[in-house]
Every structure is written in C-alpha cells, then in structure tokens.
Image (cartoon, helix red, strand yellow):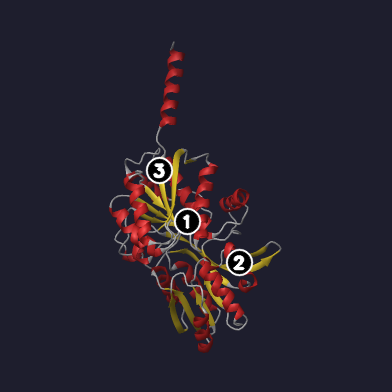
Amino acid sequence: MKRILTALFLCLMATHLSAAEPVKIGMITTLSTKAGYLGEDIRDGFKLAIAQENGTLGGIPVELMVEDDGRKPGKGKQIAERFIEKDGAKILTGIVFSNVAMAVVPKVVREGTVYLSANAAPSKLAGKGCSPNYFSVSYQNDNLDEVVGQYVTDAGHKSVYLIAPNYPAGKDHLAGFKRYYTGEIKGEVYTKLGQSDYAAEIATLRATAPEAVFFFLPGGMGINFLKQYSQAGLKGDIPVYGPAFSFDERILNAVGPAAEGVKNGSQWTHDLDNAANRQFVAAYQEAYGRMPTLYAAQGYDTARLIAAALKAVGGKLSDLDAFKVELRKADFDSVRGNFSFGTNQHPVQDVYIREVVKTTEGYTNRTVEKVFANHIDAYADQCSMK
C-alpha cells in the first residue's frame, strides 16, 4: 500500500510540474530593416540555449516571445507594454538599438520588470539611470571603442577622423574612443541613422587628411561605408578602425576585400580558447550553418545567465528580489571567459583587438591581443547602487 501511495504521489507531482505555466520571456528586437540580421542573431543565440535544454533554461520550462521593433522606439514601447500587461512577462530582453532601449527600459524597470540587455547599453543606463531591475549582459556602449582608442594611440596615429550615426549609441561610441585616444581629432561627424550614401563624408574626410579613421556604423551602414571607402581609393592610404559592430562575420561576407586587415575592438571572438566558447561556436554552426557573431554570443550568454538564476530560485519569479540576487552572481560559464557584474550591473570583462583576415571559407576575425583585463565601464561610479 505504501508503495502504491508513493507512486501515486510521484505521479501527481509529475503531473503538477508538467502542467505548470512556463516562465514567459519577452524579446523585443530588430528583425526588419537592413539591420534585421542583428536581432536574428540575438534571437538565434538565445534560442540555441533553450534548444540545448530541450525547451527549458536551468531545467525550468520557458516560453520565448519574440517581436520586431522595426528599429522604432514607439513600436518597442508598445511591444513591451503588451508583453507585460497581456502576456504577464516579468523578464524582457533583446533590444538592439540604444534609442529603442532609452524609450523602453527606464519605464519597464521602474514598474518592476527585469530587463537584461543582450546588446544596447547606453551610458545613461549605466550611470545615474542605473536600476536594480536592469542588467547589461553585453557591455557598456563605450567599451569596445575605448579599447580601440588605446590601441590607435599605441600604434602612433597622431590624428583621426570620427564618424557615427546621430543617436545615443553613436555619441557613446565616439566618447569611448576619445576617452583613451590622446592624438588630434581632425573631424567628428554624426550621420543620419540608417544612412546608405557616405560620398559627402568621405570627400570631407579625404580633404582633412587624418592619419586614421574611426567609425561606428553598425549593420548595413557599415557595409556601405566600407565599400564606398575602398572604392574611393582610401583603404590603402588611411587605415580604418572601429568596434566589432561593423566587422561581424555577416557584414564581412557582404563587404569582402574592403574590410581585410581592419582592426576592431570586441569582448568576444569565435577563437577565444575556453570550453564554453568552443562548445557554443560548434553548436551554433551546426544549428544555423553559419559562424556566430558577437550578437549571437550575447544572446546565448543572456539565456545562460537567466538559466542559472531560474535554476537557483526553482523557476519562482514571485520573489523577483531573490531572482535578481542570483542574476548578480553571474554563476554561469560565459563564452567570453571572465565575466562578472560591476556595481552598476554592467559587465566586468576582458576586451580585445581583432583583425579581419581572409581564410579559405571567406573573411573572419582573429584575436590579435588583449588590451584591457577585467575592464570596468566609465559610468559605474555615477550609479547609486553600491
């Protein structure tokens, strides 16, 4: 009789667990426009982590809801409201662009939702606008430019020309470069977000005659600029530098020879030699038939961080404070290797210089050197969470 009751109890428990509602995670990301592949890669990296756990994260069933913001702040706000109010999501992630993040994140975290950034990380959210409900699992916008500023200084370039789109991330990225570059700034130009023709900027740049160019133009903007820069005959005369966002593998396939030899800053590369990264790169290639980008790596790490925290709290989000405590521990194996959170809940991590190289399979990046170890962003001291 005792055995029967025990078996019945276990059966009822299993039924209860299988009937439990999955944890809902809302992903607001960019899947359309020329920058749509950025959101695709974040989504695909995140989905890979779920697939590797057979539909769970940390053993907890999850439901990933994904919607396209079209790179529009207003649309991002509408999606966030629907995920929270209609679907009951307590975790949001996925925003690519900082202007969308600034429209969405402050409101949702103020109202008690946990937001984990898999990409956009504007300075305002790292400093005075920090929040216990906001975590950046990517970087702080300035970081990947700071490492290039240091590298370009060390390379001896006495003057540079700067180009970026006119939106929060554009200004953050150039600020990051200037924070560590000690030479002369011969020009600082802000272009329209989504611009495709850079003939005027390139003509002005040529006339200015800097020793180097630093640009932040993610997605399709970077493809167009690099091609036009090469066609103008400047590639061999004035070296180009930038953050990883203009040199991911999907951009490089579109740009081709125009990008070869360009050095860029990143906190991740597919050749980083750690077990988590080797596993991720192989699994991603098998699942999607392409090399993962920085965005895919960040999506994957975000999912693995959530998995660790969900496992620790048994999937119970009724106590969000306990969930956030576990998130802050960052108790997971990052594909980047070293990873922890600073006082403003932004990453403390190593940052590298990579170089675009040609292989038998096309163009890719190889790690050149580690420039910063356990790098902390410039805005952490402005955050009141200490």
Q: Secondary structure at mark 1?
A: loop
Q: Secondary structure at mark 2?
A: helix
What type is the residue that disc 2 sits on? Ala
Of badges 3 and 1, nearer the viewer stands 3
What type is the residue that disc 1 sits on? Phe
Q: Which residue is mark 1?
A: 339
Q: Residue at 64%, 69% (x, y): give it.
A: 256
Residue 181 in the image: above or below residue 101: below
Residue 293 in the image: above or below residue 177: above
In the drawing, what numbered circle is on residue 254?
A: 2
**Would you say the residues marked 1 and 2 are in contact, meaning their CB atoms lie under 8 Å apart?**
no
Circle 3 residues within 10 Å: few <14, some 14–19, many ≥20: some
Q: Which residue is mark 3?
A: 24
Q: Position of residue 143 (x, y in %)?
A: 45, 67
Q: Residue at 56%, 51% (x, y): give it.
A: 276
Q: Residue furthest right?
A: 360
Of badges 1 and 2, nearer the viewer stands 2
Q: Position of residue 77 (x, y in %)?
A: 34, 56
Q: Residue at 48%, 67% (x, y): give it.
A: 144
Q: Quadrant of the C terminus?
A: bottom left
Mark before the other along the chain sequence, 3 or 1 = 3
* Residue 344 visible in rendering: no
Circle 1 residues within 10 Å: few <14, some 14–19, many ≥20: some
How far, Cα to Cα, is label 1 from label 2? 31 Å
Q: Secondary structure at mark 3?
A: strand
78 sits to left or right of 242: left
**Would you say the residues marked 2 and 3 are in contact, meaning their CB atoms lie under 8 Å apart?**
no
Circle 2 residues within 10 Å: few <14, some 14–19, many ≥20: some
What type is the residue that disc 3 sits on? Lys
Q: Quadrant of the N terminus?
A: top left
